[in-house]
Amino acid sequence: MRAFRYHRPVDVTEAVALLDADPEAAYLGGGTNLVDLMKLGVQRPGLLVDVSGLPLDTVEPGPDGGLRIGATTRNSDLAAHPLVRRDYPLLARALLAGASGQLRNMATTAGNLLQHTRCGYFQDTTKACNKREPGAGCAALHGQNRELAILGWSERCVATHPSDLAVALVALDAVVEVREPAGPREVPLTELHRTPGDHPERETTLPRGALITAVRVRPLPFARRSEYLKVRDRAAFAFAAGSVAAALDLDGDVVRDVRLAYGAVAHRPWRAYRAEELLRGRPFTAELAAQAANAELAAARPLRHNGFKVPLIRNITVRALTGLAGSVRP
């Protein structure tokens, strides 16, 4: 591992100024992703700015009745918070589906959203990867791509975003509070992550030095009936082969409103707008849920090894929505 300097800022203003002034600086939260990448030589920061001690770890009701989650809140604390468990069970389930208990005790909300892809070609410095080294090529495109994207990928990158929490928050239309060198700003979570295009090395829309300070979740009463389903190769400590975050509001049998997002299918958490549109205003059936998923997945472009993701995502969409529909019917 390359030698680095270490600093703990006294406040957010100092942290942002340090990142803005030093192109080799990186924020350190829980370190569960960054330290691994430093050991592999994928990331080589010259300065770590440790923001884990900043007072950004509270979870509290928002003024609009929603929820405000501090950026350094530990994943295990957020999953156990009574407001999360009562009002947004898909958040708690997404968090508990991710990593091990030890990692959840260290990982933070903002770090979870900003973690890098687990694509093996990105983590292997002997392989070509446009995300790690722009212009190098993409060995994954014609290599072992079982875990990689089926939606929104480009010829330059087929990596997926690994976060479970981000999928649930995208389904809930969460907003990220950011402190940038130019001042505070808010970014809808659906606009935080990018599809790769010609610049897969740019994973988010945040400028250099930006620090996420909180995530705000809007009130959504029917989210009390919500679900997060994750399919993985083993029951514990594995990234998703596919996942779905879902919340469903029925008026009798008719879909009054719905939220759907998919994980492990694209460079960013994938909000299933087409599926939602097809479901709203129609009597709910399992067949309708399958049609909605098919409509969303019509744009899928499976690679050599990951065509199974198309029926997988369709099936877990049907399972999640059918389960929710059963829970709200008398």
Image (tube, rainbow, N blue to C red):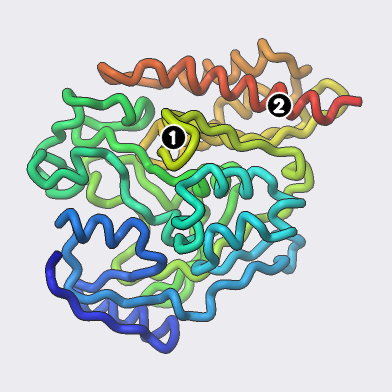
**The N terminus, quarter of image:** bottom left
Residue placed farthest to the bottom in the image? 10
Image quarter hosting the C terminus: top right
Quickly name the residue at label 2.
280
- The image shows residue 244 at horizontal and vertical percentages of 55, 32
- The answer to whether residue 259 of the structure is visible from this angle is no
- Snapshot quadrant of residue 156: top left
Question: Sequence-wise, which precedes: disc 2 or disc 1?
Answer: 1
Q: Residue at x 70, y 38 (%)?
A: 226
Q: Secondary structure at mark 2?
A: loop
Residue 71 in the image: x percent, y percent? 51, 67
Q: In the figure, 138 relative to 17: above or below?
A: above
Amino acid at pointer 2: Arg
Where does label 1 land, which residue?
A: 240
Residue sitting nearer the eye, 98 or 49: 98
Q: Position of residue 263 (x, y in %)?
A: 47, 36
Q: x, y (%) of residue 64?
A: 74, 63
Tag 1: residue type?
Answer: Ala
Q: Is residue 233 above or below residue 121?
A: above
In the displayed structure image, the side of residue 286 where residue 26 appears, left or right: left
Q: Nearer the viewer, mark 2 or mark 1?
A: 1
Residue 56 can be seen in this image:
yes
The residue lying toward the viewer, choosing from 320 and 80, is: 80
Q: Is residue 172 left or right of residue 15?
A: right
